[in-house]
Amino acid sequence: MLVKIVLLLLPLAYETTPVPPRPLGFIYEPQSSSVAPVEFDVYMGPLCPDSKAALPILVKLADHYGPDKLRFRMHLFPLPYHRNAFLVAMGTHAVDKMTNGNMTFIWSQNVYSHLDIFYDKTLTEDQVISKMVELAKSMGLPEVEFKQLATNSRINHECRVEWKHGCSRGVTSTPTFMINDIIVAEDDQANSVKGAVENCDRE
């Protein structure tokens, strides 16, 4: 009986999330080398209207406390019912690599500003990529390099790993907020961040 149970569980051991070569997510103000006492991780949908509404608030929150107290890290979690979200996630990874993280959040804000274009379910994959190339060009990024990275198999793999990581953390919707590795409700995030920072100040 024990052998049968082991044989049934064995395939699950090979379905765990791969260990990424670097920490996942995109850090706001990546040039900061400080270690913040409050880690604020948010799982965002690249084409999620709720994530679009949340991003400006999250940036203001990060700016208010500063990188010495709070580190805001954005994770991409493309929802399957947002048809073009995975391609846009690959575009985000491409921009992050091309700019060493310095234009990642600008890219995301620009995508959200053009949400109606990328949200169009009638677009083919090639058309979505063309729209992303146009957006990258408007930001001053080299078109050829961007397209090569945005369609790169390695970046495709990185996006898959990040999505699987989100699933392993129990993420089912976007945006999902975590403060120091604990999920908090959207309507309580500001109070939770404030409480976490105040607790660190007292220590």
Image (tube, helix red, strand yellow):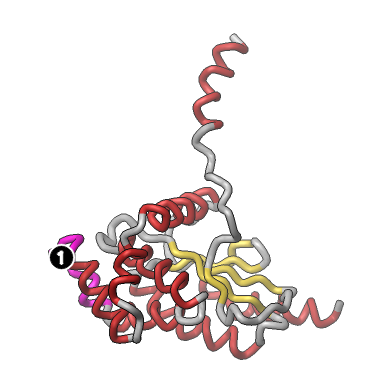
Question: Which residue is rendered at x = 85% and y = 81% of the image?
Answer: 202
Based on the picture, tell me whether residue 102 belongs to the magenta stretch. Answer: no
- 158 relative to 14, above or below: below
Question: Which residue is rendered at x = 31% and y = 55% of the image?
Answer: 80
- 31 relative to 166, above or below: below
* Residue 132, image x, y percentages: 27, 73
- Residue 108 visible in the shown view: yes
Based on the picture, tell me whether residue 124 belongs to the magenta stretch. Answer: yes
Q: Is residue 28 left or right of residue 172?
A: right
- Crowding near the residue tagged with mark 1, few <14, some 14–19, many ≥20 C-alpha atoms within 10 Å: some
What is the number of callouts on the image?
1
Question: Which residue is rendered at x = 33% and y = 67% of the image?
Answer: 88
Q: Is residue 63 left or right of residue 202?
A: left
- Residue 185 visible in the shown view: no
Foreground: 182 or 154?
154
> Image quadrant for the C terminus?
bottom right
Label 1's element?
Answer: loop
* Residue 26, image x, y percentages: 53, 70
Question: Which residue is rendered at x = 35% and y = 58% of the image?
Answer: 152
Q: Give the range drawn in magenta.
A: 115-126
* Residue 138, image x, y percentages: 29, 86
> Image quadrant for the N terminus?
top right
Q: In which image quadrant can residue 137 be found? A: bottom left
Foreground: 12 or 133?
133
* Residue 72, image x, y percentages: 59, 75
Q: Specify the amino acid type for callout 1.
A: Leu
Foreground: 98 or 195?
98
Find the residue positioned furthest to the left.
122
The residue pinned by badge 1 equals 123
